[in-house]
Amino acid sequence: MKLFACPSCSQVVFFENVVCERCNHALGYEPESNVMLALEPADGGWASVGAKADDRPWRYCANYEHGVCNWLVPADGADGFCLACRHNLVVPNTADVANVELWRNMEVAKRRLFYSLIRLKLPLVTRAENPEGLGFEFLSEDPNADGHVMTGHDEGLITIALAEADDAERETRRTAMGEPYRTLLGHFRHEVGHWYWDRLVRDAGLLAPCRAVFGDDSQDYNEALQTHYANGPKPGWQNEFVSHYAAAHPWEDFAETWAHYLHITDTLDTGRAWGFKVDPRVDREDALTAEIDFNAYAASTPIESIVEAWIALAGALNALNRSMGAADAYPFVLSEAVIRKLAFIHDLVHGRVQADVAPTEPQVEPSEQAIA
């Protein structure tokens, strides 16, 4: 995530800001140009001012009125919802203040997901445009129904339980599931990975090269999940998979790896925006040394550069968290097999996977692959 500056006064501002604390201008994010605009009221909407000013009139996404979105749409356009919110199908009851607060947490995570998808120039299709388009339902628990709302994906429809937006409830579920990491943003990145498997692998005729990396997805999915939950993770899963859940089925392996690719690229983008350089004094062999001076979202950036920088940055983030008594920011290990899978995702999102070409092997030194 890049850092932004107020176009009116050059104050540093952040992705979720709606007002500049220095000059008091209203702020809104314009996703197609990836800029924050400073705004003043104008006839029929808002006018941009300052360094990013243009002649186009703007208005906020329709969900701005609920305090859950700060993205902009052209005032003369037909769609009242922004590029992210037009994918919403079911949202919480806005008459319930507690629901709106949870929904706001959902939207913060969802917009960070869309920031990455747009930066990577990935296809985005709504359910109105295609029956298997991408859509979101944020569902509350029904007190009259048995069981819980299940977070999941079904042919483009992504359901996320509203309870996941409550930190205490999500932590309870994380502990019960034996997971080292569980966040709203992680849910979004994982579930959208299933949709992109449909779009970029199945529909693009790339099943063979994907299966060469992730395994045979034609095996019975429900049976594989039942086996996973009944017997626990496969012994030695750490050598092949980024998480124990990834070992359940190739579809879950793909979605988990996809999510981690987005974790890595966006956090490196943040590190670059903040000018991070990791150079431990005791690191005599430069195994944990990196300067994030590249664009992790660019097609031209090699996966080797991304992985090597990530190993150093993740190690530093984990050490800082431990110094604060907090859990590791990235409690995972990147084995050689996982790095190969990340390389496949990197090539896939940039259109470099071909049906008749074997995946390339990323060249990362074995001694640099583990993240404690």
Image (tube, rainbow, N blue to C red):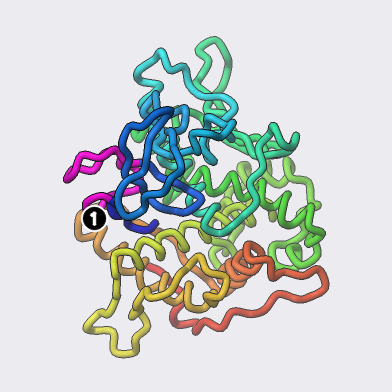
Residue occupying image coordinates x 66% and y 51%: 196
Q: From the viewer's perspective, is 358 left or right of 14?
A: right
**20 is within the stretch colored magenta:** yes
Figure quadrant of the N terminus: bottom left
- The image shows residue 362, relative to residue 371, as above or below, that is below
In magenta, the rendered stretch is: 8-27
Q: Amino acid at mark 1?
A: Ser
The kind of secondary structure the magenta stretch mainly shows is loop
The one nearer the camera, 39 or 107, is 39
The one nearer the camera, 102 or 56, is 56
> Where is residue 334 drawn, in percent x and y?
50, 68
Residue occupying image coordinates x 63% and y 62%: 349
> Where is residue 3 drawn, in percent x and y?
32, 57
Residue occupying image coordinates x 79% and y 52%: 203
Label 1, residues with CA under 10 Å away: few <14, some 14-19, many ≥20: some
> Where is residue 252 drawn, in percent x and y?
64, 51
Q: Please indicate, yes or no, whether residue 206 appears anywhere in the rendered image.
A: yes
- The image shows residue 103, relative to residue 146, as above or below, that is below
> Pointer 1: what residue?
10
Figure quadrant of the C terminus: bottom left
